[in-house]
Amino acid sequence: MRKIGLLFTFLFLLTMIGQAQSMEKLFKKYADDERFEYTSVGKGMLGIFSRFADYSEITDGVLQKITGLKVLQLDSEKTSTALLASFTKDIDKIIDKGKYETTLEKRGKNSKTYIYRKVNRKLNAEYVILTNELGSTTLVWLKGKANPQYEKEREMEEM
């Protein structure tokens, strides 16, 4: 019985690692494509910023620490609709498989914005912001440490 429990725990951890790598793989796939504008801000630079800014204030108390920020932008006026469709399909797969929660969905005449979040038991958080506007698609991936107080308040609201 104990071996079965360990096996399930191991499989669960492998699944979580695979999901986390999916977003990383997406960025690696498109980062070197010259049709995309790619920005990555690492821990070092974010550490410097944290000395001048309180992340919990910037994120309205949602995150107490930001550990990674990546942005991909595709200017759809300069590229084919096939690439845009492939990029969007890849994002949708990751969101569905990663079990992200939709926290915001806004649709306007010429724009769509979605914010997805995922927080694990250790309060490691990921936020994905996807914006489709007339002429461009932007994907922002924000990683960090969730604010425990915010998470408690959120759980209380859901009950």
Image (cartoon, helix red, strand yellow):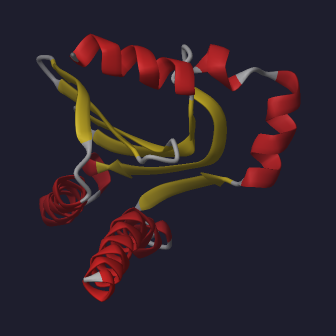
Count of picture labels = 0
Q: Toward the viewer: 129 or 33?
A: 129
- Residue 62 vertical placement versus 89 (above, below): above
What x and y, as percent, mark residue 139? 38, 46
- Residue 80 vertical placement versus 15 (above, below): above
What x and y, as percent, mark residue 44? 82, 52
From the viewer's perspective, is 136 left or right of 83? right
Work out which quarter of the rendered image holds the C terminus and state it. top left
Work out which quarter of the rendered image holds the N terminus and state it. bottom left
What x and y, as percent, mark residue 46? 75, 42
Q: Toward the viewer: 52 or 126?
A: 126
What x and y, as percent, mark residue 145? 59, 40
Q: Give the residue displayed 36% in from the left and 18% down from the top.
A: 154
From the viewer's perspective, is 102 left or right of 85? right
Residue 133 makes an appearance in the image = no
Q: Give the residue displayed 64% in from the left and 39% down from the top.
A: 66
| Residue 130 picture quarter | top left
Q: Give the residue displayed 41% in from the left and 14% down from the top.
A: 153
Q: Give the residue displayed 62% in from the left and 54% down from the top.
A: 40
Residue that extends furthest to the front in the rendered view of this protein = 1
Residue 123 makes an appearance in the image = yes
- Residue 1 vertical placement versus 70 (above, below): below
- Residue 55 vertical placement versus 138 (above, below): above
Residue that extends furthest to the bottom in the rendered view of this protein = 3
